[in-house]
Image: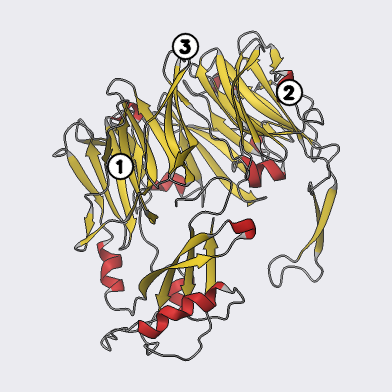
Amino acid sequence: MSSAIGRPGSALITVAGIFFTKFAIFANARLILDNVSVDVDFDKEPFELDEVVNGVFTPKGWNSTWISETAFIHKNEDGDVFKHDMQRKTSKLLLQSKVLQKYPGAIIYLSKDEKFFLFRYNITRVYRYSALSQYKLYEIDTGQTYDLDNLNKLQIAQFGSVGHSVVYVRENNIYYIPTISDIQKPIQITNFGVPLLIYCGVPDWIYEEEVLESASAMWFSPNATYLAFGTFYDENVTFFSYIQYGEPGEQQYPTVKSIKYPKAGSPNPIAVVYVYNFYTGRLVELQLPSDVDNKNKNDYILFGLSWISETEVVMVSSNRVQNESFTVRCTVEGVCKMEDHQVEHQGWIEPKLPVYSKNGTLKVEILPEEEADDRYFHIVFTDLEQGTRKRLTYGRTTALKIHGWDEEEGLIYYEATVINRPRRQHVYAVNLDAEVRCLTCSMVVEGQKCTFATAFFAKTFKYYTKECQGPKAPLVVIENADDPFDYLLWEDNEDLRAKLATKWVPEPKYLSVPIQGKDGNNFTATVEILIPPTLGLPSRKKLPAVVETAK
């Protein structure tokens, strides 16, 4: 949703009239109830609690993965895994469900050469993204399986960017298997990882939950010559203990758990990035320029890393208080230079990684830009050789994500809120002349225009999946970027629509509520009220409510 940078912007607040709320904003939101009428269809019935708990009304979305410029893999409802090719109009069975039945709840990954699957199973969750799991490699042509690390539980395992090489992390150290013939003799990349203290290739708790939002901190170079990985030093971070009660009936007494938990003013983990050369075995630390350091050395936050080319990476970071961000480019030899430096005087920064041209001299990124009396995140194009920058998007809208850059067509694909409609979201393409085209605005579901959509792109952007996620049940369509008549209706949620047609579905109502902020920084909250059809409005009686806010 659209929001100002450095002061409160447009917040979205959902009010469901069923529970009590202590938020003062409800006093304003209640004003609309006096003028709301709700039609009740008594041929329908209310939702049952067990239906909600058991996911009876869970919609189906895009549950596949693009693996090339024309093909994607998909697991059907029977559990069989297919490769679909949109250009050839073919489907190929890669994995039968009877194989996966031996590994209940398994998550599968396909190698880049499409010769192996990696099975992740017997999963024990640790935090939001991390887990301890067993892994097997499955050879597609022969059906033969190979145990990874003798079936020890691993923190993570992932395929390389070419072939079927694998890296994995056990007890905070990284191991590498170049080919299937090397599975019994993995190469140990790090030996200085220590459980709870030093994390190699995986984030510690705070980086996993609040920064990277991932269980992995490893990045292969495009041709898999190098591996960049983060190491997180937690020796100086203080432990925090909490009580874990477990599942009902499992244990009589709770367990005390401890994690490294940095509080304000106490030491943060120190993040260091290394690059490993698979051919020479050389390990290089990427030293940030001295002007990136904070008042306290190394007290910065690493927000992300990506490869610009086979021999160069880019990192984005900020100081601890997050009012300065840094974009740094480093060679695999450890030579780093500052490319960009942003300062925020009225708030904080959460920097995003730029997207670079193939030769690394051009980039597009999301940056805060002036718009009327405020600032919004927009798409900005920079020519690094010429030292020029150009803004490509305008209006009271927030660019949320860059999906990619098709250099041949000169198009940047991105996701953003709709101008002056912060609760609406669509996917767009913009060229270097700042001409914008919406890819999802024409979608219609049950006679209503789509108001909230996302997309998933194939390699080189020849095909893409567009998914309308609201206001009705999701609609998923696969489309040729060059030929709108070459498309496939992938999912229409027809069964879900039939179920919902028998239920009393809350009708959303919207209003804008002025909010008085500190120091005169006032703003307007966009409020959505979900009113149960049987509430009997209009009414002046006070009603309990649940208030949900989103940043």
Cα separation, mark 3 vs mark 1, equals: 35 Å
Q: Nearer the viewer, mark 1 or mark 2?
A: 1
Q: Is residue 512 above or below residue 165?
A: below
Say which residue label 2 marks: 190
Determine which quarter of the picture holds residue 341. top right
Q: Nearer the viewer, mark 2 or mark 3?
A: 3
In the image, 161 versus 419, the foreground residue is 419
Mark 2: few, some, or many residues within 10 Å (few <14, many ≥20)? some
Percent position (x, y) of residue 137?
52, 33
Percent position (x, y) of residue 252?
80, 71
Q: Are marks 1 and 2 in contact (CB under 8 Å)?
A: no
Q: Is residue 274 above or below residue 268?
A: above
Identity, as a three-letter code, of the amino acid under mark 3:
Glu
Disc 2 is placed on an element classified as: loop
Identity, as a three-letter code, of the amino acid under mark 1:
Thr
Say which residue label 1 marks: 465
Question: Is residue 145 shown left or right of residue 198?
Answer: left
